[in-house]
Amino acid sequence: MNKEIIFSMNTAFRGEFNIHGYSYGRGDKAACIVGSMRGNEYQQLYMCSLLAQRLAEIEAQGDVVAGKEILLIPTLNYSSMNAEKKKWISDDSDINRSFPGNIEGTATSRIAATLMDRVKDYTYGIQFASFYMDGEFISHVRMMETGKQSTSLANLFGLPYVLTAEPRAYDKATLNYNWQIGRTEAFSVYSGVTEKIDSESAAHAVSAVLRFLTRMGIIRYNCHAGYISTVLDEEELLSVKSDKSGGFLKRFVSPGDEVVRGNVIANVINPMTGEIAADIYAPTDGIIFYAQNAPMIYQNSVVFKLIRRLHN
């Protein structure tokens, strides 16, 4: 393993700020994995720590394929994590909305530009990302529809689902999008949670990355074959909202659970009286892809996203 400083700058209150990268093997720039960009992405940083351990063992065993290099960058924003803030401390900007960046710009823009220059030549780029909505979700690989995406390669992670999405305006300032535009095969891996550690789903995500690296001929590693992934477009997910009222949320289902049309899948509880203010029903047969986990829910908020069950 070789440790390097990817980015360095002096900060007003916390001294020198450094972003570190850890490389395994030597040779062609085969794969780059990037972890947490936000201060609340504890799960993503935890996954990088697990992956670092496994890659160090694989390298020590001589099982990084000769002529291949893997770069792991566990976090770009540990300062915000230390301060318990989601975004950049000084100006509340978001690193993953700052790409491709400007080396003469703000701190987050300089970080993005420096990172982009360092990782742009890797064949495969993997980001441990957090879902754009707070809550819990099924582990999956997400790709933007840039015209350069490859769902067949995404299937090789062996996760249950591959989710494709049309880029929105803000997506074009993300690492994944700019990697793809620069001809890197880019994938965002989601492991179920963000602000807490889920050891089981973290281990599944790390196994998925190792499985992918093995299938791409970058490492030698014996692993379970994983799933035959189902490819979904994000537009196919059905949103289930708390239309009538807000209050305490009492969920009866979790991501991955199967539901039947007409089942009560959550209650909204009046916080003053304790009475059920509204029942939330499954509008169709399907599988829970996403579930809100906040203690309270507001009127017209998305509580679940469903994968519709297709009938023959």
Image: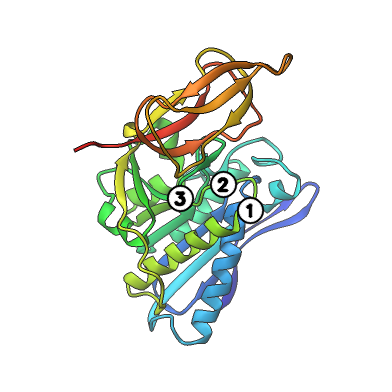
Query: Which of the numbered marks, if any, corresponds to residue 139?
Result: 3
Name the quadrant of the N terminus: bottom right
**Image x and y of residue 162, in percent:** 34, 49
- Disc 2 on helix, strand or loop? loop
Residue 218: tell me if it is visible: yes
Kindly indicate whether the residue at mark 3 contacts the one at mark 1 (C-beta within 8 angstroms).
no
Is residue 155 left or right of 265 when viewed as pictured?
A: left
Camera-nearest residue between 56 and 281: 281
Percent x, y of residue 104 = 56, 45
Q: Which mark is residue 197?
A: 1
Local SS, label 1 = loop
Q: Earlier in the sequence, mark 1 or mark 3?
A: 3
Query: Residue drawn at (25%, 37%), measured in percent from left and top?
Result: 310
Instruction: Identify the amino acid type marked 3.
Output: Ser
* Amino acid at circle 2: Val
Q: Position of residue 306 (x, y in %)?
A: 40, 34
- Label 1 – label 3 distance at C-alpha: 14 Å
Please state which amino acid type lies under the numbered disc 1. Ile
The residue wearing badge 2 is: 193
Res. 76 in view: no
Mark 1–mark 2 CB contact (< 8 Å): yes
For the C terminus, the quadrant is top left
